[in-house]
Image (cartoon, grey):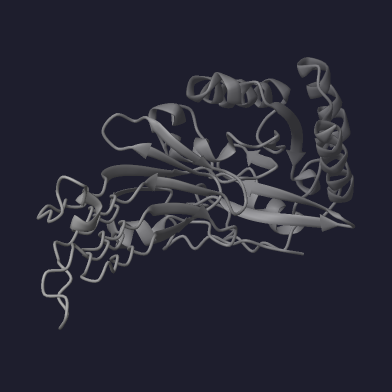
């Protein structure tokens, strides 16, 4: 099974940077001077164009850490034109690789400039300046000896804000200690940190289920609590990572009360999703009761919860593996139907 792991010490999903494309090179004023041609015509070459700043996606990246460490990104400027009609060399483009799912915004206005969500996507965010004209360009029948050349145009400078939204098929949401990390580790080859206390997961974790020719990318989102949309707990910064998911697994700890208690938890968490994004709140959800190995008569509880919510409720044990194969089959079936 394929697996993507995010290092908590290195994971960043926001960064602000400055980019600048290269300046165009200066045009050259020059005249042909050879032994038997003492007063030749103009032969000043054009300046080279400045390098573009190009963003491209790399599916092997999953953090914006590189942009926290380095904030200034500048492309090369074009070279100055030279005599004998030699044009200056254009500056090389600066290719900046970002993870798939990166949003690029103007830092001051918040305007969305690019949504880097496709594999090998390329977007020019700052075009290089145009090289200046050499004096050869200005030669005419009325001006045989032009002494004019133009400077290159300056490059473009932009202050940008980068935001990462992980691209996953299924987002696993739930209150802290619901067992999301355990479920992810059992469904895929992921090995997130697991312990029996809240907020063990401090960064989103990705895992991949691979069966036959189909794969499912799962995202374990850090535990949400009431007020998450206002930044309480781990804050709303993690909610963005489930916005691109096709649907959500709403994981509940079956040991935390009776049906009314579980219904209240579902309501609280869904309200947080709706406050953060009404679109996100409308995502299809699969309600899953976890820790079936720690509670008896779970089938009756699941049925009662299903009657109250009007949705099918599954019950599993992330620890023992009970019900995981059925859950995996359900995920594959639902994603297949959503593709058609």
Q: Quadrant of residue 42?
A: bottom left
Of the pair 337 and 50, the residue shown nearer to us: 50
In the rendered view of the protein, which quadrant contains the N terminus? bottom right
Q: Residue at x 25, y 71 (%)?
A: 84
Taking depth in this image into account, of 240 and 118 the one nearest to the observer is 118
**Percent from the top left, x then y, of residue 249?**
71, 37
The picture places residue 160, in percent across and down from the top left corner, at 32, 43
Q: Observer-nearest residue: 144 or 110? A: 144
Instruction: Residue at 81% x, 38% y: name it.
Output: 335
Front in this rendered view, residue 263 or 66: 66
The residue drawn where x is 28% and y is 59% is: 74
162 displayed left or right of 269: left
Residue 309 visible? yes
Q: Quadrant of the C terminus?
A: top right
290 is higher (above) or lower (below) than 321: above
Quick check: 167 above or below 266?
Answer: below
| Marker count (numbered) | 0
Q: Is residue 320 visible?
A: no
Please state if 198 lies on the left or on the right of 235 as rendered: right
Please identify the residue farthest to the front as the structure is shown. Answer: 36
Give above or below for 177 relative to 308: below
Give x and y (percent) for residue 307. Answer: 83, 17
- The quarter of the picture where residue 273 lies is top right
Q: Position of residue 180 (x, y in %)?
A: 65, 47
Left or right placement of residue 95 versus residue 271 in this view: left
Q: Residue at x 42, y 58 (%)?
A: 96
């Amino acid at each position: 099974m394929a697996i993507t792991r995010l290092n908590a010490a290195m994971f960043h999903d926001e960064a602000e940077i400055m980019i600048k494309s290269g300046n165009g090179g200066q045009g050259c004023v020059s005249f042909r001077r050879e032994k038997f041609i003492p007063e030749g015509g103009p032969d000043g070459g054009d300046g080279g164009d400045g390098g573009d700043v190009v963003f491209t996606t790399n599916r092997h990246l999953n953090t914006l850490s590189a942009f926290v460490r380095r904030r200034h990104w500048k492309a090369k400027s074009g070279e100055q034109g030279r005599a004998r009609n030699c044009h200056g060399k254009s500056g090389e483009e600066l290719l900046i690789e970002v993870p798939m799912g990166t949003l690029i915004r103007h830092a001051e206005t918040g305007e969305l400039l690019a949504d880097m969500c496709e594999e090998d996507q390329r977007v020019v965010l700052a075009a290089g300046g145009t090289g200046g004209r050499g004096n050869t360009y200005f030669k005419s029948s009325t001006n045989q000896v032009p002494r004019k050349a133009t400077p290159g145009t300056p490059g473009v400078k932009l202050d940008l804000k980068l935001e990462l939204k992980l691209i996953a098929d299924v987002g696993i949401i739930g209150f802290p200690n619901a067992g999301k990390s355990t479920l992810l580790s059992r469904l895929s080859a992921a090995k997130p940190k697991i312990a029996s206390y809240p907020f063990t997961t401090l960064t989103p974790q990705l895992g991949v289920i691979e069966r036959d020719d189909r794969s499912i990318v799962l995202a374990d989102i850090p535990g949400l609590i009431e007020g998450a949309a206002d930044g309480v707990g781990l804050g709303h910064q993690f909610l963005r990572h489930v916005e691109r998911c096709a649907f959500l697994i709403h994981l509940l700890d079956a040991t935390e009360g009776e049906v009314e208690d579980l219904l209240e938890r579902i309501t609280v968490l869904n309200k947080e999703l709706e406050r953060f994004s009404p679109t996100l709140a409308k995502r299809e959800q699969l309600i899953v009761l976890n820790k079936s190995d720690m509670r008896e008569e779970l089938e009756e509880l699941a049925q009662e919860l299903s009657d109250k919510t009007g949705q099918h409720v599954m019950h599993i044990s992330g620890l023992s593996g009970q019900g995981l194969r059925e859950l995996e089959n359900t995920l594959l079936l639902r994603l297949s139907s959503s593709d058609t």
